[in-house]
Amino acid sequence: MANTNYGSPKNKGGRAGERLPDQLREVRLTPDYTEWAEGSVLVEFGKTRVLCTASVDEKVPPFRAGKGLGWVTAEYGMLPRSTHTRSNREATAGKIGGRTHEIQRLIGRSLRGIMDFTRLGERQIIVDCDVIQADGGTRTASITGGYVALALACHKLQTKKLVLRSPLRAQVAAISIGLIGGQPLLDLDYSEDSRADVDFNVVGLDNKQLIEVQGTAEGAPFSREQMNQLLDLAETGLEELFRLQKAALASALGTGH
Amino acid sequence: MANTNYGSPKNKGGRAGERLPDQLREVRLTPDYTEWAEGSVLVEFGKTRVLCTASVDEKVPPFRAGKGLGWVTAEYGMLPRSTHTRSNREATAGKIGGRTHEIQRLIGRSLRGIMDFTRLGERQIIVDCDVIQADGGTRTASITGGYVALALACHKLQTKKLVLRSPLRAQVAAISIGLIGGQPLLDLDYSEDSRADVDFNVVGLDNKQLIEVQGTAEGAPFSREQMNQLLDLAETGLEELFRLQKAALASALGTGH
Amino acid sequence: MANTNYGSPKNKGGRAGERLPDQLREVRLTPDYTEWAEGSVLVEFGKTRVLCTASVDEKVPPFRAGKGLGWVTAEYGMLPRSTHTRSNREATAGKIGGRTHEIQRLIGRSLRGIMDFTRLGERQIIVDCDVIQADGGTRTASITGGYVALALACHKLQTKKLVLRSPLRAQVAAISIGLIGGQPLLDLDYSEDSRADVDFNVVGLDNKQLIEVQGTAEGAPFSREQMNQLLDLAETGLEELFRLQKAALASALGTGH
Amino acid sequence: MANTNYGSPKNKGGRAGERLPDQLREVRLTPDYTEWAEGSVLVEFGKTRVLCTASVDEKVPPFRAGKGLGWVTAEYGMLPRSTHTRSNREATAGKIGGRTHEIQRLIGRSLRGIMDFTRLGERQIIVDCDVIQADGGTRTASITGGYVALALACHKLQTKKLVLRSPLRAQVAAISIGLIGGQPLLDLDYSEDSRADVDFNVVGLDNKQLIEVQGTAEGAPFSREQMNQLLDLAETGLEELFRLQKAALASALGTGH
Amino acid sequence: MANTNYGSPKNKGGRAGERLPDQLREVRLTPDYTEWAEGSVLVEFGKTRVLCTASVDEKVPPFRAGKGLGWVTAEYGMLPRSTHTRSNREATAGKIGGRTHEIQRLIGRSLRGIMDFTRLGERQIIVDCDVIQADGGTRTASITGGYVALALACHKLQTKKLVLRSPLRAQVAAISIGLIGGQPLLDLDYSEDSRADVDFNVVGLDNKQLIEVQGTAEGAPFSREQMNQLLDLAETGLEELFRLQKAALASALGTGH
Amino acid sequence: MANTNYGSPKNKGGRAGERLPDQLREVRLTPDYTEWAEGSVLVEFGKTRVLCTASVDEKVPPFRAGKGLGWVTAEYGMLPRSTHTRSNREATAGKIGGRTHEIQRLIGRSLRGIMDFTRLGERQIIVDCDVIQADGGTRTASITGGYVALALACHKLQTKKLVLRSPLRAQVAAISIGLIGGQPLLDLDYSEDSRADVDFNVVGLDNKQLIEVQGTAEGAPFSREQMNQLLDLAETGLEELFRLQKAALASALGTGH
């Protein structure tokens, strides 16, 4: 897919760092960022930084017990000053807000979507996604990094012979796209996100299938045609993310892996 | 769009009440179901029954104050025995669950998407959607009925000369569609919803534009082609809902309206 | 008991709908109002509408376990716009208020007062009373309707042979009475309730015995004589309610029942 | 009223300390038990001990503001080991239980029932009733002692010339009575309370008027006749309590008061 | 240690009641202040009054189960009007504040520091410290009184042969000291505490060993030398407290004990 | 102070990384670790990593308003998998635990201890300390890093001319020391901390004055002599920390600063 479909020379200058409309921010995946977790990665999409850890718990939640099947769940949080102006801690407020609930449910569904729970066996993996610095796209970064943390934890379970065959059936990653002034843009940063008319988050697999599409008209409604343009753009971004995930896991687990 | 695209004779029997794949359940809108609210409607999609009320508050939330602009927000709840097995009250649990948060945020965004807040003026309309009986599709019924309650409240504001011109820029409705065994189905009931591979909720306007698309792979990932089939089906359902909304408002407000 | 004791012609006009001082509002009991619950009824006292459902749970609370005895408990809630001005949801507030606690404890005690828990066996019936529209007397409507929902659920347990003999030892109903300007009035609506000097709620059995009397001087203290006048009036109202409960159950369960 | 109406010689021995059926436990009121509060009293009914303090707050609650009228509210709590077996702290549980809510609402209504809020002026008095040791009758002891604390605080406001005439229109006290095996008993202790068939709490004024009657059938329903017997007995007890309140206030404020 | 080290004649007059710098307020320990608890004492340091009760629970917390070892924990609370101006109840606020947490953790650690948990056996003693009136030093009074309540409860366990040898390995008490204008003062009352530059709480054993030292510069930093002066002063106070604890226990348990 | 006082050759090998008894772990301070906060630093003590950010709020808390004085407060949190085994989020639990309260109160007091609030002016600085990875000493790392974040924020206020003279009166840092088997050790890591008999946290200023000393006997009581040995050791550690803080600030703000 050529850039020229999405970005004409004159509005190219509109993105920070001279980014093209169909260009991701610089994405970095730093595996084994912390030591105690079974899997951990620092994922960065430009200035957005999220620490993802995967913790193995040998118990499953009550609704899942006694079936021989595993479970994956996710939790999401933002450090109080990960945002431009400080937000109150949810622990202090005494409750988790609606946005947090919505995001952690999305991350959990996305990661469960690639799991073979029979292979995982009756144990739970909890993926924590904590935002160190937010500049747009924290939920898609969380899914993209969450996959890497999950894969590292699964690998550790295999190494310890607790799991025989990999419980991962596919790679999963996520990306945001949006419409600003009619222009489809890939991987919105915060300043773009806050003035987008339409905002989509797409969660896909490395076989081009999708597992979650969430599109919202923030400023103006959208047509089926615009939606299709945005989804085309998402595919481009996801492909690049799958490549980066593979590279990060290879570096962490050794070349032959 | 012909039914034959979606439902062959042999699987027609698979839906309760001999429903066709592209057929809505019986939808009923009973305006003015309660007396105190500025707008109220009982919306039924088959056995799913939701009471929607719109309450006008002459104050806006703090983040909105002093701008001369109005606001619309939504709250959603389920009566404890609206479900097949009784659920605990969120009031007793002391907190609102993630699903409730997600749904009430969706309803709120959908209804705000059609509002002209300058015309509404600095006041808030709170739309409460309370599920009396649940049989699948409560969030889409809430949006569809929420629009009617909101329109009745706006009409009352105009009647009282508090608002000069209607703050509604369009009609909004929502419908679910899903894939079961590869078959796209419109307006899933609970038993269908719980075995669907893919589940979409689509919020659209009466000009065919969309304002929210949420698709989730519950059991198996989906392709772009399948997604397009589902969205075609959604359009059919939405058209019928816009017609029913119009009829309900006409009956409540008088023919010439 | 003659009306003339309580209502002289000249103040008869003071009640909405030309109601006599010792006259109930129109009371309607609509059994099987919802489908999933083991017992359900919509109870209406004039504009007051409460949905009562009875849910059977095969477990009893911990303090009751292992004794072979059943339990009945009640929960009470108001929809946010059941009231003239919208109230905040208790789920959003994160806690149940004092008034709600007080009412649901009263309903629970009243319904337990007629139960033979040995016959019920070690299971719990939860009676949910949710106010759709409030116009005074929601707690007495809840008890009156709660009995019908409970009776329907007990009948279902007998039909399924889970319970051999009816666990109901009596009928129970409740009514409010009050003093306004020295005049005893039966079944206060909201506008009466808010200007009553004295407000009583009486819970009685169909054998004329009482199980709960709660009288409060809202505006002025009361004498023993006044209290006795009010209790006489309550008896009249309760008799009518027992008759209506019987009729509702007969219609739901068949004549010969 | 003669004892012989209520207690025959043979069951006299049934009460702790050879108490007669119409005899109060030893009641002690120790005014000024603590120093900081505007009014304070330790009230004891036998082993039941409640510390009541009245705190003057120069602000009224929001719903009362700007009307020139005062307010009285009450809070009630039990120390964790005031009971035979330790109860969890409500502060640790994070919420106030239903029983506590019910009791503190009753105390508040009872004390408000004697107030002239115009004379009090736009200020609030908060009466805290904290149970040091519980042996039945804590709510009636709280009302009886709460009156004394309230009267001391009102006296202090008059002494400081903040209030010109006493805002107290009457004395208020409360007592429990119950039926055990058909025998009416005055002022139940815990062991009596837990086996009573019927349990009444009566709040009365020193002019024989009543402001609150709450009667509950714990074990068996009751007739109008039994209820009247119990209320007769309550009158006896209340008279003694009014005498003791007067004596306590006289000792605290000086004879001529 | 001579008083002359700490209090010169000219500033002697600075303390309430002509107290010397190294002099405790009048300390009173009233054992068996309440009846239900296994151990109870009212501890008073001048106007500070704290009720300490020790409750034996035959279960230990989950983290301690199955090890044959006991546990001691403490809870702390203040009555709303124990303070000069009324504080809100933590139960009403729905959460325990930071100061309360800090204090109850300190009391618990201090009391656990003298326990032989093997001798206690797998049971828990909960020490509740509830402040009736606060005038500074409530946490040190709680520890000092908490020891007496704990010792009474342990004695009761021995009397009942549930415990064979005393689980107490030492006496524990606590005292505050502070620096005001360079002058070390023992046992600060509220007015002193609120203007102290440095505030220490010291928890010690009757063998002169320490188990907790907490020193905070409220107004000005302190030197090692000043800290040593304060700790010398604490030793004087602790010795007196150990003597008073012994006397209180002897009076409660009989001389020969 | 010579190492030989504290570490004999034979037990030197007991510390991870051949660390000497009076030797700090490798301490790293990375200023400007995040971009949005007015001050930020990543502080590492060996494997312990804490992100400290300082956020300027132009409002002070209500109790401080209208006095022309500033305020500093601190909040502390641990990421769920910062610990060896995953802990539940406090946001999910709905309340902040006692340990967190205790720590954030300590950090706040320590940082306030060096502030000139007149110079700061009526604004608040909130210092958030979030533990990325925990290996003992997180509270002392938080204070040490918190100072750097606070200094960076103060510098920014001076640069913007919002504050004229530095509101910092001294440098503040904190260190832990402990006794293991009679051996005093500086800067305990988690494995040392969990088997220490005595554990001290000392907060000091660069002029050798102290502002907080907290010592706890975890396993065995301690003598005044042992306490003095530990405080000597703390002084050594604090000096090194002051040097590192100076270097970090110099690198962030330019040499001449």
Image (cartoon, coloured by chain):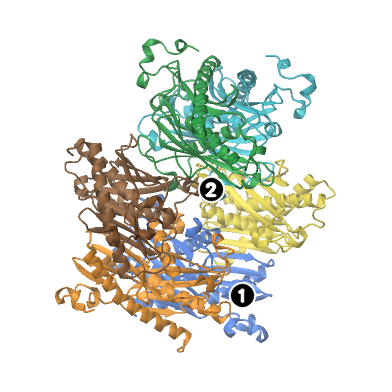
Chain colours: A blue, B yellow, C cyan, D green, E brown, F orange
- Which residue is nearer to you in this view: F137 or C127? F137
Q: Residue C111, how many percent across, how many down?
A: 51, 28
Give the chain letter at badge 1. Answer: A
Tell me the residue at 47%/79% (across/down): F32
Please say if B37 is above or below E189: above
* Quarter of the picture holding the C terminus of chain A: bottom left
Q: How many marks do you count on the picture?
A: 2
User: Is circle 2 on the same chain as circle 1?
Assistant: no
The type of residue carrying mark 2 is: Ser
Q: Element under label 2?
A: helix
Indicate left or right for C63 with E237 as reference.
right
Tell me the residue at 22%/62% (across/down): F223
Indicate left or right for C90 with F232 as reference.
right
The type of residue carrying mark 1 is: Glu
- Can residue C92 be seen in this snapshot? yes
Label 2 – label 1 distance at C-alpha: 41 Å
Q: Residue D243, how many percent across, how many down?
A: 51, 24
Q: Element under label 1?
A: helix
**Which is in the foreground here, disc 2 or disc 1?**
1
Indicate left or right for B136 with E69 as reference.
right
Please say if A216 is above or below F47: above
Please say if D101 is above or below F74: above
Q: Residue C56, how many percent across, how many down?
A: 48, 35
Q: Which residue is mark 2?
A: B191
- Which residue is nearer to you in this view: B134 or C220? C220
- Can residue A133 be seen in this snapshot? no
Q: Which mark is residue A192?
A: 1
